[in-house]
Amino acid sequence: MLKKLSVAAAVLLAMGGAALAEPVAYTWTGAGQGSGKCTSYKMTVDVMVDGTVVKGLFKQEGRTERHFESTLGAGGTIKAKAKLDGGSTMDVKGTINDGESRVVLDGYCKFDAKLVRK
């Protein structure tokens, strides 16, 4: 009986520790890819992961800050759309896990943000 209680207590502590895990912040700054002026565009991407909730901000130099929200899927995948001016959108895809932290913004240009932990 004591052994069962000890195991139950250990499981509850482990679950509580996971629930209290601190959010993780990531960042990236770099240039776009693609045709035209894309390679001269500088973008900063900031991502916060809190449990399975992913919130991101991105700002192209000289433009308005934008945001996206997603949830972590299988293997840490994310997929969202970010609203831009004039009703257009930018696709946001990526993977955030222990092996890889990357967000790809794909719209008028492509920005392959290889995130680093803040």
Image: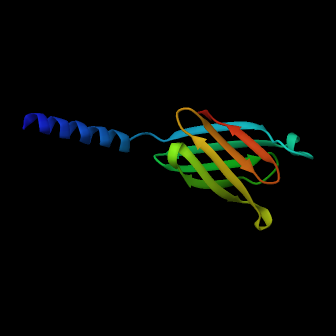
Q: Disc count in the image? A: 0
| x, y percent for residue 79 | 61, 53
Given residues 26 and 97, the one toward you in this image is: 97
The image position of residue 82, as x and y in percent, is 68, 58
Q: Is residue 112 left or right of residue 71?
A: right
Observer-nearest residue: 66 or 70? 70
Residue found 30% across the figure and 38% down from its top: 14
Coloring applied to the structure: rainbow
Q: Is residue 69 left or right of residue 19?
A: right
Q: Quadrant of residue 1?
A: top left
Residue placed at 33% from the left, 39% from the top? Answer: 17
Most extreme residue toward the bottom, as rendered? 87
Residue found at the very far left of the displayed protein: 1
Q: Residue at x 66, y 43 (%)?
A: 103
Residue 25 sits above or below residue 92 on the image: above
In the rendered image, the vertical position of residue 101 relative to residue 83, given as above or below = above
Task: Say if 6 sits above or below 85 in the image.
Answer: above
Which image quarter: residue 113? top right
Q: What residue is rendered at 90% in x and 46% in y?
A: 35
Image check: 18 left or right of 75?
Answer: left
Comparing 81 with 56, the one in front is 81
Residue that extends furthest to the right in the rendered view of this protein: 36
Please name whichever residue, 1 or 84, is drawn nearer the observer in this view of the structure: 1
Q: Locate the C terminus and report the quarter of the image it occupies.
A: top right
Image position, residue 105 (x, y; %): 72, 48
Rendering quarter of residue 88: bottom right
Q: Position of residue 18 (x, y in %)?
A: 37, 41
